[in-house]
């Protein structure tokens, strides 16, 4: 097995390398003056099983193109089996037609990855589970739930856990929320919201009695933070004792950090699927937990032809 890393999130790649005790293969990634990407793999990969780690975070197009070019380089270097490890799958929110003459970009990106020559995809908390079906190759979608479960056990006292209520920020996240709530034998609530247009949301109602409860909001992506901060405000107005958020992918664009700092949220916990700037790292209300061990164990199981789903039993 060989591990390769793109430039999108080198810290996560190093952490996965440490978990597996396998050094990262030396790769040169350069950009010409016109920003064309050039890749050179500096070790022999002929006949090797390759795991290429590259989330397609912002700038999404650059990191996606880098991923495709690296896959092509591996194919032309006669690698045996190439697994694209994409901790954050960009364009996942464009998973269906939202109106006339609009694309399904998540499917287009899947086609590009398959056409480039990947044999398998490993990703984490896809925005919609059906995106797995967009790929014509085996695709493993991991869940951050075990990482969040351990963190909740560490951060909340027994008394605090007895008053926990898990909250889905919309109806689409109910399955994810109920799955973690079962682990704690806890109740769930749902935020009834509407979205007048992309990037904006309005909370209409809270379904469930949250008074006096320690509410934990669960979601796969936090982008501008508007939805989450509005939900936290509505929960506090309904009498919630505290509101904490556990979000897999911290996109955190635009005014997100400022909104979170001024919000009713006690804390926002994100994973390290996306490399964060100093503004996020220095925010006292945002804390990062690592998924390196989870991804590393999944890579080991794939390489050994073992079950990946056993990780979530």
Image: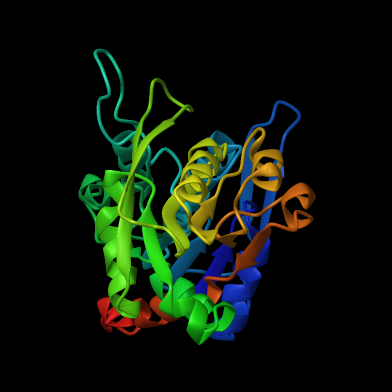
Residue 93 seen by the camera? yes
Q: Is residue 249 above or below residue 68?
A: below
Q: Is residue 221 left or right of residue 275?
A: left
* Quarter assignment of residue 310: bottom left
Residue 154: image quadrant is bottom right
Name the one closer to the observer, 244 or 141: 244
Q: Is residue 24 left or right of residue 217?
A: right
Q: Position of residue 129 (x, y in %)?
A: 26, 52
Colour scheme: rainbow
Q: Residue at x 64, y 45 (%)?
A: 263
- Where residue 165 sits in the image (x, y, percent)? 39, 65
Q: How many marks?
A: 0
Q: Is residue 222 visible?
A: no
Tell me: residue 154, above or below residue 239.
below
Taking the spot 46% from the left edge, 49% from the top edge, the residue there is 235
Residue 245 picture location, percent across and down: 52, 57
Q: Is residue 264 left or right of 311 when viewed as pictured? A: right
């Amino acid at each position: 097995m060989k591990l390769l890393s793109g430039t999108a999130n080198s810290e996560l790649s190093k952490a996965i390398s440490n978990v597996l005790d396998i050094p990262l293969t030396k790769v040169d990634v350069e950009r010409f003056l016109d920003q064309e990407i050039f890749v050179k793999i500096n070790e022999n990969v002929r006949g090797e099983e390759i795991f290429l780690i590259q989330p397609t975070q912002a700038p999404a197009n650059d990191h996606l193109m880098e991923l495709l070019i690296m896959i092509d380089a591996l194919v032309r270097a006669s690698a045996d089996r190439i697994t694209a490890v994409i901790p954050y799958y960009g364009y996942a929110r464009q998973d269906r037609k939202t109106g006339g003459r609009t694309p399904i970009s998540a499917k287009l990106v899947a086609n590009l990855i398959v056409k480039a020559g990947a044999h398998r995809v490993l990703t984490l908390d896809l925005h919609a589970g059906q995106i797995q079906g967009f790929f014509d190759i085996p695709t493993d979608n991991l869940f951050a739930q075990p990482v969040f479960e351990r963190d909740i056990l560490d951060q909340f006292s027994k008394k605090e856990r007895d008053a926990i209520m898990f909250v889905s920020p919309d109806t689409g996240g109910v399955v994810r929320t109920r799955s973690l709530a079962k682990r704690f034998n806890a109740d769930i609530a749902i935020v009834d919201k509407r979205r007048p247009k992309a990037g904006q949301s309005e909370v209409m109602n809270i379904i469930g009695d949250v008074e006096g409860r320690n509410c934990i909001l669960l979601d796969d992506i936090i982008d501008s933070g508007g939805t989450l901060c509005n939900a936290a405000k509505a929960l506090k107005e309904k009498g919630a004792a505290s509101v904490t958020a556990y979000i897999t992918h911290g996109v955190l664009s635009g005014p997100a950090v400022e909104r979170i700092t001024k919000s009713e949220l006690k804390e926002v916990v994100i994973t390290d699927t996306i490399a964060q700037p100093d503004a996020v790292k220095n925010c006292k209300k945002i804390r990062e937990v690592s998924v390196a061990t989870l991804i590393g164990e999944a890579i080991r199981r794939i390489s050994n032809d073992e079950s990946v789903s056993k990780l979530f039993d």
